Amino acid sequence: MRRFWLLFAQTTTVGLAIWFIVTTLKPEWTERIPGRPPAGQAITKHMVPLQEAAIASSPAQGSYRDAASRAMPSVVNIFTSKEARQPKNPLMNDPFFRRFFGDRQGEEEKQSSLGSGVVVSPQGYILTNNHVVEAADEIEVALADGRKAGATVVGTDPDTDLAVIKIDLQNLPSITLGHPEQSRVGDVVLAIGNPFGVGQTVTMGIISALGRNHLGINTFENFIQTDAAINPGNSGGALIDTNGNLLGINSAIYSRSGGSLGIGFAIPVSTAKTVMESIIKTGHVVRGWIGVEPQDITPELAESFGLAHKTGTIIAAVVNNGPAYSAGIRPGDILIAIDGKPVADTTAMLNLIAQLTPGASIKMIILRKNKEETLSVTVGKRQNMKRPVENRELE
């Protein structure tokens, strides 16, 4: 019996010694014991044993935290305001009413709106939508790091609904421009902006379509369509790829309720870059113009007029004494090529003409009574078309 007692005592002593060494040198080993409370926390009869996941040192599979963290500092909130004069009330001409209600004639009221923008240069240049800053008397930009600054408008382009504004701050985080021409339908994208003024928000979706046009939103359309949630306040924000590179500027949504229905449109950064560089250089965008009103060729029109060509655009009207009129183009002609490039439809025609240099003489091929003719047209300069300020939704 004495032997067993000595063996038990020695075993207990060795075990306590091992436990003391482990808890002293490797305390984290003891924290992995199921049901044991964290170090420094006493065990009570009310303690409920819980299991906690190990702290991950790398993002979970399928996470886009790295892309979001790269791009979010470059996306800003834009607050605009303008002074709105109250309409004059005839009753205020009565001294009795003026005595009790005060002289409120001509009183001004400040109206505010919000949107988003993207810092594209450390010099303070910010890309946003024209409808975000149009008609604003004051523009304030709030950065993700909490800094705020007043902004000035460098220039706007209503035809693409783009605008460039500038702030004067140091150490600005500028975004990296991506390559939307390499994007494909099904690619994952993230939308960053300030929806409904709740604060900077990131949503995820895919590219639903590329090259969307004929929507009637802008004069020149080449939209990236996405199902990433875009809501009021997201206008001018960033659409990025999974590497955090800028693919487009969020511009409009299709909605019957005012909220996201999974159909949003972004202006490709390739278009935005061209517009921005022209605005910074000259203050506006220079485009070609010939003075015609085009109309797409539909199967019904082709059959009605006995047209052999199914592509091209019908000239529905010509501006008197404009470049096209002076060159001999008349209503009813079908424009099928501009400067050696085929015209598929009205969208293609507008884009081709817009790229022409004002003052240049270029060759245009028309179809008149099913006979081709080549005319020389001296390109004019397109004037920016003012579009009404409205909610950027398609009903």
Image (tube, helix red, strand yellow):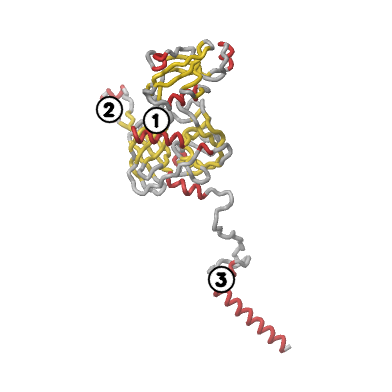
For label 2, the residue is: 98
Visible residue check, residue 348 = yes
Amino acid at pointer 1: Asp
Amino acid at pointer 3: Pro
> Residue 234 location in percent, x, y?
46, 38
- Give the crowd class for mark 1: few <14, some 14-19, many >=20 residues within 10 Å: many
> Residue 17 location in percent, x, y?
60, 80
> Residue 98 location in percent, x, y?
27, 27
At 42% from the left edge and 21% from the top edge, which residue is drawn?
362
Left or right: 313 with respect to 376?
A: right
Amino acid at pointer 2: Arg
- Give the crowd class for mark 3: few <14, some 14-19, many >=20 residues within 10 Å: some
Q: Nearer the viewer, mark 1 or mark 2?
A: 1
> Residue 348 location in percent, x, y?
49, 25
| Disc 1/disc 3 C-alpha distance (Å) | 65 Å
| Disc 1/disc 2 C-alpha distance (Å) | 45 Å
- Comes first in the chain, label 3 or label 2: 3
Q: Nearer the viewer, mark 3 or mark 2?
A: 3
For label 3, the residue is: 27
Q: For residue 157, which numbered disc appears in the image?
A: 1
Instruction: Tally the marks.
Output: 3
State whether residue 209 is above or below residue 35. above
Q: Secondary structure at mark 2?
A: helix
At 53% from the left edge and 45% from the top edge, which residue is drawn?
242
- Give the crowd class for mark 2: few <14, some 14-19, many >=20 residues within 10 Å: some
Residue in front for this viewpoint, 298 or 94: 298
Q: Secondary structure at mark 3?
A: helix
Q: Nearer the viewer, mark 1 or mark 3?
A: 1
